[in-house]
Amino acid sequence: MSAAVGTLRGAPARFTGGLTELAPDTYAWLQPNGDWSESNCGLVAGADEAALIDTAWDLRLTQRMLAAVARQVDAPIRTVIATHADGDHVHGLQLLLGAEFVCSDHAAEELAHENPASLRRAQLGVRLLSRFGVGPPRRFGAYLHRMLSPFDFTGIDIRTPDLTFTGRLEMDVGGRELRLHRLGPAHTAGDTIVHVPDVATVFAGDLLFVGVTPNGWSGPISSWQAALHVIAGLEPEVIVPGHGPVSGLGELAQLDRYWSWLTARATRLLTQGRTVDETAAEIVLSDEFALEPWGRWDSPERTVGNVVLIDRARRGVPTPISHRERPALMWKVARLKATLDAAARP
Ligand SMILES: [Zn+2]
């Protein structure tokens, strides 16, 4: 028996974590609750080899996942697929040097921007800010300190892929067919799903968040919704999100509705002259938001990044939120979190 896998920041787990058998020789590794960097992985085993889908954000958490896999699956991991280039899905790749690393060509380009050393420096900086800062800088520091504190970014090397593809790639893993489709740009440019047709399962990466507000770095949202429609068209019985519990077409459709709902409301407020920050705050504090299913999702403060993408598309400049822009965005996210906390106090 493996030890229970709880959440990384002490919140009560809303679903069972750890290695979960979805179908014969087909597994998800679930990291409750799917909030910031609580990311899932997948494993598909064939006759004499297995493929891993994604890793955790650091080596220790990836080792824990690999140990659980080794107890359950005899076939060696000969392939590792990254659904996209975000660190919380690729930082453990160096533990699988014997396995061929596969990702989309867009994800390969984005990998070049991953910088674990800068995360180590940020970890120290935000810890100091959270202790010794004053006012908004302290609030920003505390938010990021909480986000980064479960992870150890020492010793991480970003791997270069052994094989990249454009559009689609079909692979044979010990007699199991895996179909990779690049469906970005959406969460990132390189977003890829892994469809395993013999068990009607899709590993969706961060095209699907369940129980937690999605965040997008790339967009546009219309492209994200198109990706969701492609997944639905595959008629999967099981969909493993990048963050959240094992799901299906219902959760996929709910995310599609969320994007339509948010796009309509944000566009209306932005057109009336509200700023991005005002728009996001007005939406997440509204009674109608609270009545929707997404009113109960974790981290509603991430709405502000989604409004940034909606605003850029509305103005005809649907550019991604670059790595350089991310600290400024996180400042807005931390500010919206403080606004929400203040509104929740009696
Ligand atoms: Zn992720």
Image: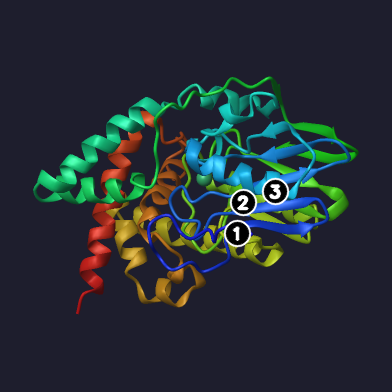
Q: Nearer the viewer's eye, disc 3 or disc 1? A: 3
Res 274 quadrant in image: bottom left
According to the image, label 1 marks what residue? 256
At x 49%, y 23%, the residue is 157
Left or right: 270 in relation to 212: left
Give the residue at mark 2: 225
Distance, label 2 to label 1, CA atoms, is 6 Å
**Residue 177 appears at what percent x and percent y?**
86, 40
Q: Is residue 37 left or right of residue 198?
A: left
Q: Residues within 10 Å of mark 2 (few under 14, many from 20)?
A: many
Q: Nearer the viewer, residue 187 or 171?
A: 171
Q: Residues within 10 Å of mark 3 (few under 14, many from 20)?
A: few
**Where 224 falls versus 108 (above or below)?**
below
Q: Earlier in the sequence, mark 2 or mark 3?
A: 3
Report crowding for label 1: few under 14, some 14 to 19, many 20 or more residues within 10 A (C-alpha).
many
Image location of residue 341, percent across then percent down: 25, 66
Residue type, mark 2 in image:
Gln
Q: Distance of mark 2 from mark 3, alpha carbons?
A: 38 Å
Q: Nearer the viewer, mark 2 or mark 3?
A: 3
Of residues 231 and 114, the one drawn nearer to the viewer in this rendering: 114
Looking at the rendered structure, which numbered label has been put on residue 71? 3
Horizontally, residue 308 falls left or right of residue 48, namely left
